[in-house]
Image (cartoon, grey):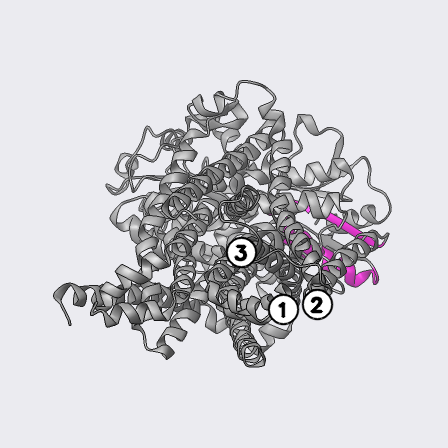
Amino acid sequence: MKASRWFEQLAAVTILAGVAGVASASNDRLVLTGSSTVAPLVSEIGKRFEKQNPGIRVDVQTGGSSRGVADTRSGLVNIGMVSRALNSGEHDLVAHAIAMDGVGIILHRSNPVQTLTDEQVKAIYRGQITHWSEVGGKDVRITVVNKAEGRSTLELFLHHFALKNSEIKAQVVIGENQQGIKTVAGNPGAVGYVSIGTAEYEAARGTPIKLLPMAGVAATVDNIRDGRFPLSRPLNLVTKGAPTGLAKRFIEFARSGAVNDLVEAQFFVPLAR
Amino acid sequence: MHTLSDRAFTLSIWGAAALGAAAFLWLLGDLAWHGMAHLSWSFLVSEPLNAGRSGGIAPILVSTLLILAVALAAAIPLGLGAAIWLAEYTRRSGALGRSIRLSLDVLAGIPSIVFGLFGNAFFCVFLGLGFSILSGGLTLACMILPIFIRTSEAGLSAVSDDWRHNAAALGMTRASVLWHVLLPAAAPAVICGLMLGIGRATAETAALIFTSGYVDRMPESLSDSGRALAVHIYDLSMNVTGGDSAAYASALVLIVLIVFINTGALALSDRWLTRRITAT
Amino acid sequence: MIWSKPSSSSRWHADRWLEPSLGLLAMGAALILLLVLAFLLHEAWPLLSEGDLLHLFTDGGWYPLEGHFGLLPMLWATLAAALGAVLLAGPLGLASAIFQQFYAPSALARLYRTVLALLAGIPSVVYGLWGLTVLVPLIARWQPPGASLFAAILILALMILPTIALTSASALAAVPKAWLQGAAALGLTRKGVIMGVAIPAARSGILGGILLASARALGETMAVLMVAGNVVQNPTGLFEPVRVLTANIALEMAYATGTHRAGLFASGLLLTLLVLALAWMAARITRSAHPV
């Protein structure tokens, strides 16, 4: 009967699945999972590494910093990617910073407000200031854009302004960086905070957003490099214990000056000179 | 006989259809406006460069088709079999059939991100398939099964009982009645379910990030990780600064791809339909 | 069930193994749900085993890092968004189906069907992108902040419209032509034939399609995440930002660990139970509507 063909197909798929499972483990393959912020950069670094080391495969997967930590711990992957400094509960892992990233406050370009003090930012995020007219702008309602709980930029922001997330009265909560830029670009009353390199690029390309200075320091990539800008974070590769073999070579390569152009192309700040 | 209410009804039907078409044109127009400039032949046949901002989508296109092929290879036989059983061998009020229908309806409502996390835990880790096209395809198969089964089942149930009586009277076996009479008669519904399934599978993001993965290299086998087009679009628009025009262009490609697959499915069903019915 | 028991003669041989193996396939498909449920329970266990399930519903807010796991506002938001979308897309989708079955010339109907299949195949991230860059700024000019329950309802309605239209159309197509011709011969207008004969006859297929669509609306993630604003609060107004359960998972999963992660899986579990309740109710309604 024709029906039997379906079962054959099904059986074939199942057997195929079994064979593929055995074939996937090999020694010349490096697997990384983790932060979606870091993934595009490491993916590019991996391609260059593959080109210089024929036969080697670098597979970069995304899924978030927590996934990077968990998978590295369980030994599922060789290296994890984490877009923040490791916290006190993660001392079993070793961090290898490959780049820096700064976080700056952005407004819509049409907003006449040129600067906000730390106190004003706090009051805006706490919902005590609700209209731009209270800080020298137009009589427009403020749309507070905040990051979702657990995101490393949120932690950085909360820490800098000594805020608790439950104090913040947000109108929009976002996930990825570009969502923040697009949200602020589409709303003349919005205020948000995003990665500085990306905001500089978008503003230069004509997206209607602008970066505000923080504590008198202009939000530029140069100021992050010099360590003068107050809000910045390391982008890390993490390993369980000291890395060996292929993982060690890859991390050394990712930290070397040979990838500075790739780091800059992803709008981050290189560490190596 | 044209009463006023009849005319108003006609008007509202055309109005609703026009509204649907207008929304679609707006969306498509917006995509074309932003993506057309980036679209070219070399975009289709080259590898992505600089995180996808430049270069093309060739490996991603190949991975997408492979993932879809795996998903359909698993879902069509399983889904058709289940649909036939539900429609032909169970009573509407039978407890087993009812609970299977219920669980399929529930399955249809499980968010794709949960499927993604489940697929990662089950196919990638538990079955040891790792981040691979196979894991992604099988996860998608789980996702599209409920839609496919339920629409196919509805199509089979709608076939008039006269056909079954006549076929039984002719002494045909049930299997051959199914193959020669019932399935061809239900083909439009089966194809409808398939089209919905293909649409959902090709458009899926969340379930694939965790299963077929993020690697944008040309896949060499089904056990390689391969980035799907929808994942690529998500990454370019939400995560890669300056990737918007490439994202829109990729979305256009995805839509054209779906047109091709759907037209193919329709043409196939038409041919099958005529062949089976004339052969019987 | 019109089949007599298969006789024992050899030509029925194929039929004997056909039924059990098909049944096995069906049960295999249903088994996936059990696997998914088991997985969700396992992952949510660290939070659930702390006892006192009530605090998932009584906690005022969702601040998992500060130990508050209130899911109730997100549950209401999920229901409001899905209900709004179905109320909007249901009539529109049914009308579209009637259009392609009874009103459009056959070439136009074919084109329209292709368009609907296309709409069904546009990735949710593209809907979301369009919503975020076109729809939300438009609403923001009128009712800031723009990202709101209203935006979520509009985007969801657009996304489930093709599902409702395509399934309803195939249900309408299955209504025997003789019935329609008979009704028309009795002097019913086209509206009368459609409302009085075609729709009642196709009712269970249409309801099934709407159910599938509501399930999709409840489970949709990426598009809603981009337009709904994602603030955890009870949906008090159409133009207030809300967060749905799926967006909660997608937003925070990437950086969640420990009980925070378990809390997100509890969101998934709650959503699944919600869909289960919905499907169960729908099954009851359709069963009481036409007993077999």
The local crowd at label 1, few if under 14, some if 14 to 19, many if 20 or more residues have their Cα within 10 Å, is: some
User: Residue B197 is drawn in which quadrant?
Assistant: bottom right
Q: Is label 1 in a helix, a strand or a loop? A: helix
Residue beneath the point at 70% across and 36% down:
A70
Looking at the image, which is closer to me, C20 or B103? Answer: C20
Q: Is label 2 in a helix, a strand or a loop? A: loop
Please determine if labels 3 and 1 lie on a single subunit.
yes
Q: Is label 3 in a helix, a strand or a loop? A: helix
User: Residue B69 is drawn in which quadrant?
Assistant: bottom right
Q: Is residue C13 above or below residue B238?
A: below
Q: Chain of mark 2?
A: A
Marks 2,1: beta carbons within 8 A: yes
Q: Measure the alpha-carbon separation of dots 2 and 1.
A: 8 Å
> Mark 3 = which residue?
B87
> Mark 1 = which residue?
B176
Question: Residue C200 location in percent, x, y?
Answer: 32, 56
Please determine if labels 2 and 1 lie on a single subunit.
no
> Mark 2 = which residue?
A1
Marks 3,2: beta carbons within 8 A: no
Question: Residue C288 location in percent, x, y?
Answer: 38, 43
From the viewer's perspective, tell me whether residue A247 is left or right of residue C18: right
The local crowd at label 3, few if under 14, some if 14 to 19, many if 20 or more residues have their Cα within 10 Å, is: many
Q: Quadrant of the N terminus of chain A?
A: bottom right
Looking at the image, which is closer to me, B171 or A189? Answer: B171
Give the amino acid type for the residue marked by disc 1 in the picture. Ser
Give the amino acid type for the residue marked by disc 3 in the picture. Ala
Q: Chain of mark 1?
A: B
Residue segment shown in magenta: A28-55
Give the amino acid type for the residue marked by disc 2 in the picture. Met
Q: Measure the alpha-carbon separation of dots 3 and 1.
A: 16 Å
